[in-house]
Image (tube, rainbow, N blue to C red):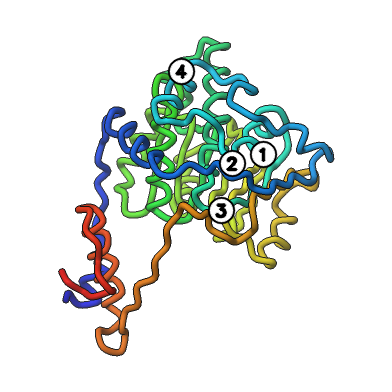
Amino acid sequence: MPALGEALKRRKFIPKTKGIDELIQEQQQINHGPVVNAKLPVRIIGGDGNGESHIIRSFNDVKINAELRNTLNSINYFEPTDVQKCVIPLIQNTTNDILCLAATGSGKSGSFLIPIINRLQKDKLSSGFCQSETLNNSSVAIIVAHTKELVEQLYKFAKTLAYGTQVGVAYARGQMPFEEGRRQLANGCDILVITPGRLQHYLSDGWIFVDGTQFVVIDEADKFIVNFLFRTFMFSATLTEVADFVINDFLKKDCYKVIVGKPNQAVSHVHQRVLKVDVDKYGYAAKFEMARIILRKISTCEEPKNGVLNP
């Protein structure tokens, strides 16, 4: 077993460029799992007091451009999930901030990416603006996620949804060479997916400008609370009482609150397992080694058995 220092050794991350066919195939595999058909209890409070009147039944109830609709069909997104039925029309048809609380695996990412990409593509088509003409070092939408892995996941999904449109997507995360991030920004991007540390660095160094930013999305909002002066969308699968109290300082008073299902519970089709590591026997470094083994076995479709460290 490698020493703890070796297990935690930081390596410079070199982004791997994936083609759109590979990204679409990945999304198709993700969406081949069980579909959430069960009708979950839905509440929309705040706003103008008529939030539930905005709920849609299908994608046909909102005007989605042809390019985006074709991509949705290609990744088996034929009907919106419960959370998407609530959030998509609120983003498209209102100007309010939004707080959304829904379980992991319920479709929160699509609920904000679909209407944002749809809006950006509509604006580009109406103005004759193309992707290459996007203002350098400026993003219309900034999506902040608290981990590198979540940033990559959101970037891949956004890149897939934007296929066929003129909407540019970029991302930046820790351990990524600064030159790579600056290159993406210099090329211009409409949607930037980024970790909070990188965002703070880019803002303080003047690498990114927010004059034209219209949307700020904070994914897994309970992990950090950030104050922005834009239209703000907060999404989370969990929300503690403390976080619920604090958000009142960061969202406008007329924000919509969308609650899908029972708070702080996972949906039934997301399988969760806990593997115990004997720290007394193996040491704390065993946790990191176990995580490495699990990731390797998952990538090769193997199953770690009984939490035993078998490299």
Residue type at tag 3: Ala
Measure the C-alpha gap from mark 1 to mark 2.
6 Å
In depth, the one of 59 and 8 nearer the eye is 59
Measuring 80% from the left and 45% from the top, which residue is drawn there? 46
Of badges 3 and 2, nearer the viewer stands 3
CB within 8 Å, label 1 to label 2: yes
Measuring 27% from the left and 77% from the top, which residue is drawn there? 285
Measure the C-alpha gap from mark 3 to mark 2.
21 Å
Q: Is residue 260 above or below residue 207?
A: below
Q: Residues within 10 Å of mark 2 (few under 14, many from 20)?
A: many
Q: Quadrant of the C terminus?
A: bottom left
Determine whether the residue tagged by mark 1 lies in a helix, strand or loop: strand
Measuring 74% from the left and 56% from the top, which residue is drawn there? 248
Instruction: Residue 263 in the image: state x and y as whole percent.
Output: 64, 58
Determine whether the residue tagged by mark 2 lies in a helix, strand or loop: strand
Quadrant of residue 222 within the rendered picture: bottom right
Residue matched to label 1: 231
Quadrant of residue 237 within the rendered picture: bottom right
| Horizontal side, residue 279 vs residue 264: left or right | left
Q: Residues within 10 Å of mark 3 (few under 14, many from 20)?
A: many
CB within 8 Å, label 3 to label 2: no
For residue 67, the mark is: 4
